[in-house]
Image (cartoon, rainbow, N blue to C red):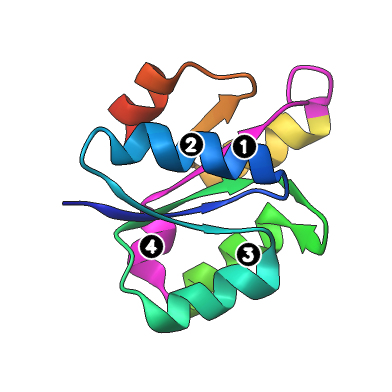
């Protein structure tokens, strides 16, 4: 069973994604921001992460950089989610430069499951 970390500052989004992926046999741990995500990585061996670009206590890019340094396996299996990539060309270029997939909110859960 894959074990993933879902990081999003919206509590409702964390609950919905955790529920949907759990139904498909994926163990999902959630975090509201950078501090919680780092602490979770210290406790759990994740196979990958799903990270919202904008968090209350920083950015998903900051978390991704930290993962690359401390948990490169998780970083290699990271995808980003965001609600504003279509309206923000700079953001799109940043994500593209990282070479990571991105899902635009609202996203289809089937697409998310397929990416995992």
Pick whichever, 76 or 106, lies toward us.
106
| Circle 2/circle 1 CB separation < 8 Å | yes
- Mark closer to the chain start, 1 or 4: 1
On residue 74, which mark appears?
4
On residue 13, which mark appears?
1
Which region is colored magenta? 71-89
- Mark closer to the chain start, 3 or 4: 3
Q: Position of residue 116 (x, y in %)?
A: 31, 38
**What's the distance in space between the residues labelled 2 and 1, CA to CA?**
6 Å
Where is mark 2, residue-wise?
Answer: 17
**What's the distance in space between the residues labelled 3 and 2, CA to CA?**
19 Å
**What's the distance in space between the residues labelled 1 and 3, CA to CA?**
18 Å
Q: Which numbered mark, 4 or 2, is in the foreground of this view?
A: 2
- Mark closer to the chain start, 3 or 2: 2
Where is mark 3, residue-wise?
Answer: 63
Q: Within 10 angstroms of label 2, few (less than 14), some, or many (20 or more) residues?
A: some
**What's the distance in space between the residues labelled 1 and 4, CA to CA?**
21 Å
State which quadrant residue 112 falls in: top left
Q: Residue at x 29, y 26 (%)?
A: 114
Residue 80 located within the stretch drawn in magenta: yes
């Amino acid at each position: 069973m894959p074990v993933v970390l879902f990081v999003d500052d919206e509590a409702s989004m964390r609950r919905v994604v955790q529920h949907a992926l759990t139904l498909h046999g994926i163990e999902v741990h959630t975090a509201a921001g950078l501090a919680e995500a780092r602490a979770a990585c210290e406790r759990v061996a994740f196979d990958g992460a799903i990270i919202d670009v904008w968090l209350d206590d920083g950015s998903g890019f900051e978390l991704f950089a930290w993962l690359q340094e401390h948990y490169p396996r998780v970083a290699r299996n990271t995808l980003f989610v965001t609600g504003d990539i279509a309206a923000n060309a700079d953001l799109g270029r940043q994500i593209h430069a990282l070479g990571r997939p991105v899902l635009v909110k609202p996203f289809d859960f089937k697409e998310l499951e397929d990416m995992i």
